[in-house]
């Protein structure tokens, strides 16, 4: 589950990570009021107006701007709110901006020059360890840094059993070229950031930039946070932060129906029981010349209502030209699934306007095939895995 910047910062702050302070606003008037509050509490004279959408690269798309007075706060907030923000991480259509973060200016003058770093915490699946990735080259062009000067990207792996060791935090601060007060501040920052990552059950914390201010404070100016959905039962307060406006509406509907669904860019809808079989099905579709349009695991109770719901969700994608149903009858009997498919087809009528290939294997597979073949419905049955994929390929020609 992705969070907005202001939500991620709230989590960071709760674990002692210093953040750029800000207040969320949904109207230009609220933005002005928030700016006044920030000035009173922080002393900031200038304010940064930041679009709150689930996408990076907001600055490049015009979603982050500096306001030097209250009139500019109102004007900029009015321009950003309601805009379709297009960034390198959105579709060509962009994302609607419904709220902005009014943040304090932290690039104030002082004894030293401000400096920007990049830092993220995530799981290295290859080693089974957590990893802190960091660079001296923070800012909007970090992707270019990774592509063209990868030697400027450092990593520090952390054994989850031992946790982050003090020497590792010091090593990170040293590699970032810090000394004195800034060095100590960075070690505290890294330690608090790793603690936040672990205790919030996150799958990603990305801070770009991490700022060393002109008076040697270290703080998170931005925050991209992804929480592990599987751990949300432990964090009811975090679950409440979900903003479904930022998510794919089809995926939102599927989740509400209890289906495991991920939208993809292909032309073959998939309805499968079991995540492993679903991934294998997607692979075979691709090898046979098609492109999977989704990942959909209907689970072990593929009754008529559940199958009908799954069909309806798959068909919301206008790119779908065929549907492959691939069910292994272990816990659930194949003939019951077949009856569910037939009943769903009858109930939906003309709503099903693409070919359906149905492969059922396992308990009562033969009875299931006969049921489908004798149903009078336009459902193409298959027995073998490759046979099903070949029939999908045939109907796409």
Image: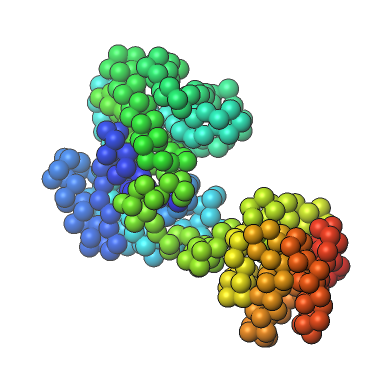
Q: How is the image coloured?
A: rainbow
x%, y% of residue 194? 39, 30
Find residue 298 and report its image quarter: bottom right
Q: Indicate left or right for 214 with 161 as reference.
A: left
Task: Depth check: give the residue in front, 303 or 307.
Answer: 303
Q: Is residue 246 above or below residue 186?
A: below
x%, y% of residue 95? 47, 60
Instruction: Give me the residue at 27% from left, 58% from top.
Output: 25
x%, y% of residue 100? 33, 55
Instruction: Give me the residue at 26% from left, 42% from top.
Output: 21
Residue 215 seen anywhere in this rendered image of the structure? yes
Residue 352 seen anywhere in this rendered image of the structure? no
Task: Depth check: give the residue in front, 108 or 222.
Answer: 222
Q: Indicate left or right for 159 with 197 as reference.
A: right
Instruction: Give me the residue at 28% from left, 63% from top.
Output: 27
| The C terminus: image quadrant | bottom right
Total numbered circles: 0
Q: Is residue 190 above or below residue 247?
A: above
Task: Depth check: give the residue in front, 62 or 30.
Answer: 30
Instruction: Give me the residue at 40% from left, 49% from top.
Output: 232
């Amino acid at each position: 589950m992705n969070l907005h910047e202001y939500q991620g910062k709230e989590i960071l702050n709760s674990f002692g990570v210093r953040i750029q302070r800000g207040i969320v606003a949904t109207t230009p008037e609220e933005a002005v009021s928030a700016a006044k509050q920030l000035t009173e509490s922080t002393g900031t004279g200038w304010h940064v107006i930041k679009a709150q959408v689930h996408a990076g690269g907001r600055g490049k798309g015009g979603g982050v701007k500096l306001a030097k007075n209250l009139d500019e706060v109102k004007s900029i907030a009015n321009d950003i709110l309601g805009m379709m923000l297009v960034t390198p991480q959105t579709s060509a259509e962009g994302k609607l901006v419904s709220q902005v973060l009014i943040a304090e200016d932290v690039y104030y003058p002082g004894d030293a020059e401000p400096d920007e770093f990049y830092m993220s915490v995530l799981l290295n699946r290859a080693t089974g360890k957590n990893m802190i990735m960091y660079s001296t080259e923070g800012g909007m062009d970090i992707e270019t840094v990774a592509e063209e000067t990868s030697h400027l990207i450092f990593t520090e792996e952390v054994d989850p059993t031992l946790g982050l060791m003090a020497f590792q935090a010091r090593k990170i601060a040293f590699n970032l070229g810090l000394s004195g007060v800034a060095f100590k501040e960075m070690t505290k920052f890294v330690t608090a950031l790793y603690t936040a990552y672990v205790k919030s059950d996150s799958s990603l914390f990305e801070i770009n930039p991490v700022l060393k201010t002109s008076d040697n404070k270290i703080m998170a100016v931005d925050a991209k946070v992804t929480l592990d959905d599987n751990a949300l039962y432990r964090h009811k307060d975090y679950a409440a932060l979900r903003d479904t406006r930022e998510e794919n509406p089809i995926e939102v509907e599927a989740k509400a129906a209890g289906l495991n669904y991920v939208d993809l860019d292909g032309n073959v809808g998939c309805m499968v029981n079991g995540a492993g079989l679903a991934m294998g099905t997607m692979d075979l579709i691709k090898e046979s010349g098609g492109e999977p349009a989704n990942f959909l695991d209907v689970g072990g109770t593929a009754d008529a209502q559940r199958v009908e719901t799954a069909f309806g969700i798959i068909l919301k994608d206008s790119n779908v030209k065929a549907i492959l149903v691939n069910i292994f009858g272990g816990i659930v009997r194949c003939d019951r699934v077949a009856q569910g498919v037939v009943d769903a087809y009858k109930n939906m009528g003309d709503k099903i306007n693409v070919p359906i290939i149905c492969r059922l294997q396992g308990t009562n597979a033969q009875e299931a095939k006969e049921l489908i073949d004798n149903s009078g419905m336009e459902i193409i049955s298959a027995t073998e895995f490759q046979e099903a994929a070949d029939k999908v390929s045939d109907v796409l020609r």
